Amino acid sequence: MSVVFVTGTGTGIGKTFVTSALIRHLRSVDHPVHAIKPVVSGFDETNWQKSDPAVLLAALGRPVTLPEIELLSPWRFIAPLSPDTAARREGRAIVFAELIEFCRDTARPPRRNLLIEGVGGIMVPLDQHRTVLDWMSVLRVPIVLVTGTYVGTISHTLTSLEVLARRNLDIAAVAVSETEGSAASLADTITTIRRFADAIPMVGIPRLGAGALDHPAIAKLARLILT
């Protein structure tokens, strides 16, 4: 592993949970790791302690402060909308070239093992013309696709995998994060996805609490991205 991009089939799917669990596990086995979440929408400036960047900072063992959040997430928007729409509401815009340069600068040696967490799903717009898919296509680093077990996830997952394959992107693993209250089981969801995408490593992650770093599923996912 050098740089891995964590994306998802949609918003609220568990990207931050998976990213933070990977961080904690890698740190527990003495693998240096850093993480960024460059773009955040729905950022509540009055409750930033519970934001996704704050979760990543806590996992990294860094101070959970606004200046630290600014370093991890330079593009923060208040509205819980796609980044292009949220930015437009604030009279701002994401400059795509600056986003790419920020990721590349953060990944430069001597830094090792960088996790880049995306925003929303793979086709979420960043500006007038580019999506998260374009972001990943320019960086061209291995990808962890996070999905759930909610009804509809199989179609969303297979569609995402098809789109990623068409861009010739390297899919390191699919992390199936169990959706709370779903009628579909974790095992059944993985079995069905695997029937159509059996060449791609898949990891099922049950609902986990604070001890997530010790769970075999997280250790397995960490091994996949380290190879």
Image (tube, rainbow, N blue to C red):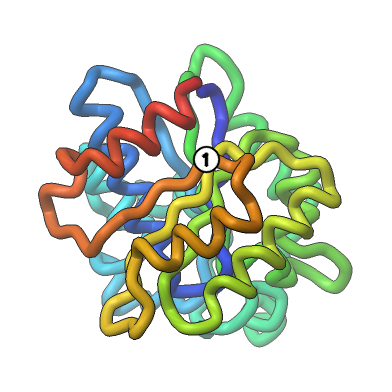
Q: Amino acid at mark 1?
A: Pro
Residue 213: which quarter of the image? Answer: top left
Q: How many marks?
A: 1
Q: Is residue 72 above or below residue 84?
A: above
Helix, strand or loop at label 1? It is: loop
Please identify the quarter of the rendering in which residue 216 is found. top left
Q: Is residue 95 shown left or right of residue 156?
A: right
Q: Residue furthest top?
A: 110
Q: Is residue 170 above or below residue 144?
A: above
Q: How many other residues sit within 10 Å of disc 1, few (<14), some (14-19) or many (≥20)?
A: some
* Residue at position x 62%, y 72% in the image: 156
Q: Position of residue 190 (x, y in %)?
A: 45, 59
Question: Where 25 sits versus 39, above or below?
Answer: above
The residue under the point 28% across, 46% down is 21
Q: Nearer the viewer, residue 174 or 135?
A: 174
Residue 74 visible, this orientation? no
Question: x, y (%) of residue 97?
Answer: 80, 47
How far across and how far down the image is residue 27, in percent? 25, 28
Drawn side of residue 120 relative to residue 99, left or right: left
Residue with the mark numbered 1: 201
In percent of the image, x 69 and y 71: which residue is there?
124
Residue at image point 88% right, 68% down: 129
Left/right placement of residue 227 relative to residue 222 reads right
Residue 129 visible somewhere in the drawing: yes
